[in-house]
């Protein structure tokens, strides 16, 4: 089954072609980061307009790169939510129109399911069941994944998402938007032991997180110590956030007797998180899988992949609605 996937939930237009027999054939992405940078965050109206400009050229590109024609498509998948309503409507409108014109099914995909399944786009995908650490700009959750659509929420953030904490801390350090990658680069040159920052909820005995206090602790530190040792502050923040993420993920594996852990979402690209998690998991006999680096942040490949899983079981449906807010735990199992 050949599926075109379209992602347009936030500030990245992603399009990809996934074939259930041959794997990922092509993917293309346009990031709007430079366009939003002047505003210090995503401007929803600008995001929608840019998705409109990008989505068809990107679609032509993946078709040309893979040597496939529209007539070969078996289905179209698009991000139905959660995300920015206007941005979602661009992908949904384009995908539904294309599917209608080609007389093939379309399926709306949950953005987080896309992230969650992204490590499976691999020649050696992890087997179910696994524990998933989902760390993006908008969400931080630990789930147990028994199969596609079989998700049990074990814990989540009570306030800021991990990526949001990286972004806000980066802003405090004058690193611009989105600051996650810049903060992690600066942290690599710093000394994490110069300053000591709290590890919120490390010993709370559950799998929930809280990152807003850590951000406030950085603010207090910057006010007191200034930005003379910004790299050390970045390293101290990253060490604190990563320690909580690693400790809780491994504890969730132990509590559910699961020996496989999967990391997904933008913060999954963080080198310090990957290094520490891989080391500590190995010491406990737990195998960790990560998406390819380019598939940690938003992309069309994860939507095409998740869509292919759902289209294999879905009955055709012509409903057209986006879901800016959508609880992952309400998805049907396949
Ligand atoms: O998954 P994603 O593209 O967007 C959402 O669905 O939210 O994640 C974007 C987030 C941003 O907060 C960004 O700063 C963070 O992922 N991020 C990183 C790194 N790369 C991206 N955070 C820490 N270290 C990184 N290397
Ligand atoms: Zn995302």
Image (spheres, rainbow, N blue to C red):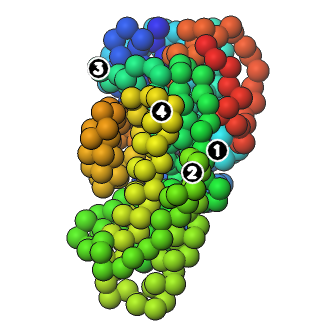
Residue at left offset 71%, top offset 29%: 330
Report the residue marked by disc 2. Answer: 205
Q: Are marks 4 and 1 in contact (CB under 8 Å)?
A: no
Task: Work out whether residue 270 can be spotted.
Answer: yes
Q: Residues under labels 3 and 1: Cα distance? A: 30 Å
Report the residue marked by disc 4. Answer: 131
Q: Earlier in the sequence, mark 3 or mark 1?
A: 1
Q: Residues within 10 Å of mark 4 (few under 14, many from 20)?
A: many
Q: Which mark is residue 35?
A: none
The answer to whether the residue bearing label 2 lies less than 8 angstroms from the nearest atom of ligand 1 is: no
Q: Residues under labels 2 and 3: Cα distance? A: 36 Å
> Relative to 155, is 54 on the left or the right?
left
**Helix, strand, or loop for circle 2?**
loop
**Mark whose residue sits in front, 1 or 2:** 2
Q: Residues within 10 Å of mark 1 (few under 14, many from 20)?
A: many
Residue at left offset 59%, top offset 67%: 212
Number of numbered tags placed on the structure image: 4
On the image, the x and y values in percent for residue 53 come to: 53, 43
Q: Which mark is residue 123?
A: 3
**Mark whose residue sits in front, 4 or 1:** 4
**Mark whose residue sits in front, 4 or 2:** 2
Q: Are marks 3 and 1 in contact (CB under 8 Å)?
A: no
Q: Quadrant of the C terminus?
A: top right
**Mark whose residue sits in front, 3 or 1:** 3
Report the residue marked by disc 1. Answer: 83
**Helix, strand, or loop for circle 3?**
loop
Residue at left offset 27%, top offset 49%: 275
Q: Earlier in the sequence, mark 4 or mark 2?
A: 4
């Amino acid at each position: 089954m050949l599926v075109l996937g379209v992602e347009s939930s936030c500030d990245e237009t992603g399009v990809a072609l996934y074939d259930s027999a041959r794997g990922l054939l092509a993917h293309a992405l346009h990031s709007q980061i430079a366009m939003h940078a002047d505003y210090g965050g995503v401007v929803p109206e600008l995001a929608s307009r840019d998705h409109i400009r990008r989505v068809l050229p990107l679609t032509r590109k993946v078709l040309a790169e893979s040597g496939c024609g529209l007539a070969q498509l078996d289905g179209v998948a698009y991000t139905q939510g959660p995300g920015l309503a206007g941005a979602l409507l661009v992908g949904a409108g384009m995908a539904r129109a294309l599917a209608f014109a080609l007389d093939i099914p379309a399926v709306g995909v949950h953005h987080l399911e896309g992230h969650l399944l992204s490590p499976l786009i691999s020649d050696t995908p992890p087997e179910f069941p696994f524990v998933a650490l989902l760390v993006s700009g908008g969400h931080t959750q630990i789930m147990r994944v028994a199969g596609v659509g079989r998700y049990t929420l074990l814990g989540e953030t009570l306030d800021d998402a991990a990526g949001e904490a990286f972004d806000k801390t980066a802003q405090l350090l004058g690193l611009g938007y989105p600051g996650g990658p810049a903060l992690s680069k600066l942290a690599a040159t710093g000394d994490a032991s110069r300053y000591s920052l709290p590890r919120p909820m490390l010993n709370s005995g559950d799998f929930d997180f809280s990152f807003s206090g850590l951000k406030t602790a950085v603010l207090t530190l910057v006010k007191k110590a200034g930005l003379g040792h910004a790299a050390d502050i970045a390293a101290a923040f990253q060490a604190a956030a990563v320690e909580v993420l690693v400790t809780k993920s491994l504890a969730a594996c132990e509590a559910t007797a699961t020996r496989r852990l999967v990391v997904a979402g933008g913060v999954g690209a963080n080198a310090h998180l990957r290094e520490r998690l891989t080391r500590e998991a190995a010491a406990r006999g737990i195998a960790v899988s990560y998406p390819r680096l380019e598939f940690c942040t938003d992309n069309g490949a994860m939507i095409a992949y998740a869509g292919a899983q759902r289209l294999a079981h879905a009955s055709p449906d012509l409903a057209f609605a986006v879901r800016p807010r959508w609880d992952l735990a309400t998805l049907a199992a396949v």
